[in-house]
Image: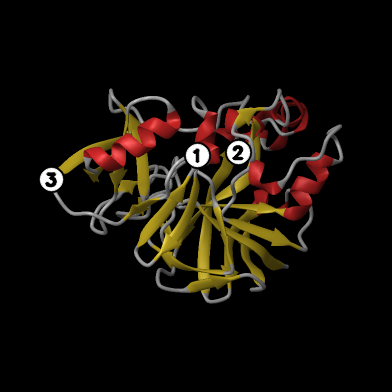
């Protein structure tokens, strides 16, 4: 088995970036979801409610970002220091720094609503789910866990059940693995990729973002959730593990959430994937 694709998403819910290598940090891959967009009430925004976010392109340049959108002058976004504010993603918080009026106006104009861009400083972070925390482990602005892995074979199995196959970017994984069996990642407990070791937490529960066409930034019907529901609900896939993993019986599972155990290592496309422990 090998790593066939590595993706990072510097600004939560904006367009992702495919890279050939990435440094593993305690909060996830370097530059992954270190920026967050909130609305005027402080609520974090994602493609669940604003699918147009998928159309804003992002490129990592140095320690900062170059962002672009059709019809708008490109914008440079550098890490900033300043007064700390509290950023809330689901039920966990992190310190963050808010950007200036000019930067926020650019994103507001593109998205068609008043928003603010936040940056997570190097010394900040959100705690991972206490159920899986082994002591002070952190996550960036990702939904709940530092990384998400998905097997090529799992997508192939799903696509075999769909009238119209879907691309990998619908599922926004950080790591894609080739050479595994469909849904083998469900049972991976600890894996090694190159010199990096990761442990699994729980399968990734899928939401309506999977129904967003990432190229158009628009909802695109009920797939793949409609089909995934028929054979990937927690009650059907792993009924004996629902309580231990904190899953609801109707949760739709596709992919595996990971926590890095070897910060500082680098993962690369082509790296071998070794399964150290299953269960």
Q: Give the number of the disc on residue 83.
A: 3
Q: Where in the figure is residue 141, as x and y percent of width and height?
A: 38, 44
Measured Cα–Cα span from mark 3 to mark 2? 43 Å
Q: Which circle's residue, 3 or 2, is located before the other in the chain? A: 3
The answer to whether any part of residue 246 appears in the image is no
Q: Residue at x 25, y 54 (%)?
A: 121
Measured Cα–Cα span from mark 1 to mark 3? 32 Å
* Number of marks: 3
Residue that protrudes farthest toward the bottom in the picture:
195
Q: Give the number of the disc on residue 209.
A: none
Q: Secondary structure at mark 3?
A: loop
Closer to the eye: label 2 or 1:
1
Dividing the picture into quadrants, the one containing residue 23 is: bottom left
Q: Which circle's residue, 1 or 3, is located before the other in the chain? A: 1
Left or right: 148, with 236 as reference point: left
Residue 14 position (above or below residue 137): above
The residue that label 1 is drawn on is: 71
Measured Cα–Cα span from mark 2 to mark 1? 49 Å
């Amino acid at each position: 088995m090998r790593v066939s694709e590595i993706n990072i998403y510097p600004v939560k819910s904006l367009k992702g970036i495919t890279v050939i290598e990435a440094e593993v940090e305690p909060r996830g891959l370097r530059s992954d979801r270190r920026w967050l967009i909130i609305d005027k009430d402080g609520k974090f925004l994602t493609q669940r409610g604003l699918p147009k976010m998928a159309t804003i392109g992002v490129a990592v340049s140095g320690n900062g970002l170059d962002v672009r959108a059709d019809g708008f002058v490109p914008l440079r976004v550098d890490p900033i220091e300043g007064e700390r504010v509290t950023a809330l993603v689901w039920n966990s918080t992190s310190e963050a720094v808010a950007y200036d009026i000019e930067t926020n106006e650019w994103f507001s104009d593109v998205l068609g609503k008043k928003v603010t861009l936040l940056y997570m400083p190097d010394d900040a972070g959100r705690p991972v789910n206490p159920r899986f925390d082994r002591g002070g482990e952190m996550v960036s602005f990702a939904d709940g866990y530092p990384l998400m892995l998905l097997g090529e074979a799992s997508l192939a199995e799903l696509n075999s059940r769909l009238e119209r196959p879907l691309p990998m970017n619908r599922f926004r994984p950080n790591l894609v693995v080739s050479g595994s069996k469909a849904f083998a990642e469900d049972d991976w407990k600890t894996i090694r990729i190159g010199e990096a070791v990761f442990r699994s937490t729980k399968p990734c529960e899928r939401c309506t973002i999977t129904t967003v066409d990432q190229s158009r930034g628009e909802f695109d019907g009920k797939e793949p959730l409609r089909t995934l529901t028929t054979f990937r609900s927690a009650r059907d896939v792993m009924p004996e593990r629902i309580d231990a993993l904190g899953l609801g019986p109707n949760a739709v599972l596709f992919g595996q959430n990971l926590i890095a155990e070897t910060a500082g290592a680098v993962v690369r496309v082509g790296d071998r994937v070794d399964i150290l422990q299953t269960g």
